[in-house]
Image (tube, grey):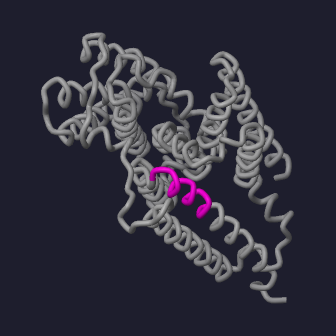
Amino acid sequence: MTATSVAETAGVGEILKRNLRQNGILIAFIVVFAVAALLNPSFLSGGNITNLVLQYSYILILAMGMLLVIVAAQIDLSVGSVVALAGAVSAVLVIKNGMPWWVGVLAALGVGLLVGAWQGFWVAFVGIPGFIVSLGGMLLFRGLTYLVLNSISLSPFGGTYYEIANGFQNGLLGGYGVDNFTMLVFALGGLAFVYLQWRTRQGRLRYKQQVDGLALFIGKQVIVFAVLMWFGYQLATSRGLPNVLVLLIVLVIIYTLVSQKTVFGRHVFAIGGNLNAAKLSGVRVRRINFWVFVNMGLLAAVAGIVYSSRMNAAQPNAGDGVELDAIAACFIGGASTTGGIGRIGGAMIGGMIMAVMSNIMQLMGWPQPTQKVARGLVLLLAVAFDLWNRRRAETAA
């Protein structure tokens, strides 16, 4: 039997064992999604699916930056305050001083970069743990938000700024009851995904690595394509393609490539996986840690723009507690509590699990305290699973 045929006929059970973390979280998402649909049929409506995208996209944006921080064996507790500060600065310029929307956006991004550089300096070059630095930052930047806003809310943004998180791309190709442009975008996206998966499979075969059997591979791609088209159909029959979803997809593609295909991404994983080995290998640990926090500040500012646009206002208490949602998304998505392990896709799935849970609990009319209890238990179970999985792997080795 050739190496290629061995790879193609690898057992499903063996493949699942090699990828327990990724497959486990995907199965968990499917179960949570199915339960939500059974509990409340309106969960599957186009309007609710659209609201899911609009309401929770900023959490997924934060989760991308938080994943790199966690992989580098650090933590950032200040991102909720940075979300508020970025939105506050933008609101003062756009609402209070009447400047163009793009000035507010650039100012918010500049705030995020400065915050990231500030925290990165203390972590990377002074040597203070990220937990302590960001805990101080959480208080510092929240206080600055109150000062910038003079302890009052500013609204409304209106215009183009409002459209960032509330606007849609629709009607470009017509359609009766279904937006053709949205369906075309999802069809092209689905075909691109299948093509990339096929190329990945062929590359693994060339290196004689085990892959799914051809029938299983085709079946999985058909299912993924069908799910994407169903999701696109729900959006197309509601209001079309949300602007914020386009932004989110672009960021997911960029950060997936950064984390998996660049020297920077490999160095982040090396630092989190084995700090001493990374130093001996010539990795510039201080520089990498600095830029990890700068990147987190930038994405927190992007999330702040999206959040303030969605709310059509800047509020002193905006983003309160969202750092916990971002951290939970990463851990639920398979990131290790000790660093060195995690994927952007996993963090996105973890964030979607949190979003689906929050959404269905709201649809069911659960009180806020009960919702917090449920989310806390899910986070605890996810971390417990991570520890159990790591210990099992160490025992097997």
In the displayed orientation, state which residue is furthest to the top. Answer: 151
Mark count = 0
Residue 110 magenta-drawn? no
Counting from the top left corner in percent of width and height, residue 70 is at: 55, 38
Q: Quadrant of residue 288?
A: top left
Q: Is residue 168 left or right of residue 187?
A: left
Counting from the top left corner in percent of width and height, residue 296 is at: 41, 38
Counting from the top left corner in percent of width and height, residue 364 is at: 69, 28
The residue that appears at 65% across and 61% down in the rendered structure is 227
Residue 229 magenta-drawn? yes
Q: Is residue 368 left or right of residue 179?
A: right
324 is higher (above) or lower (below) than 299: above
The segment highlighted magenta reads 228-239
Q: Is residue 63 visible?
A: no
139 is higher (above) or lower (below) than 159: above
The residue that appears at 43% across and 23% down in the rendered structure is 133
Please identify the dominant SS of the magenta region. Answer: helix
Q: Is residue 52 left or right of residue 308?
A: right
Q: Is residue 52 visible?
A: yes
Front residue of 182/189: it is 182
In the displayed orientation, state which residue is furthest to the bottom. Answer: 1
The residue that appears at 57% across and 42% down in the rendered structure is 48
Counting from the top left corner in percent of width and height, residue 247 is at: 40, 51
The residue that appears at 42% across and 52% down in the rendered structure is 251
Front residue of 142/279: it is 142
The quadrant of the image that shows the N terminus is bottom right
Front residue of 77/46: it is 46
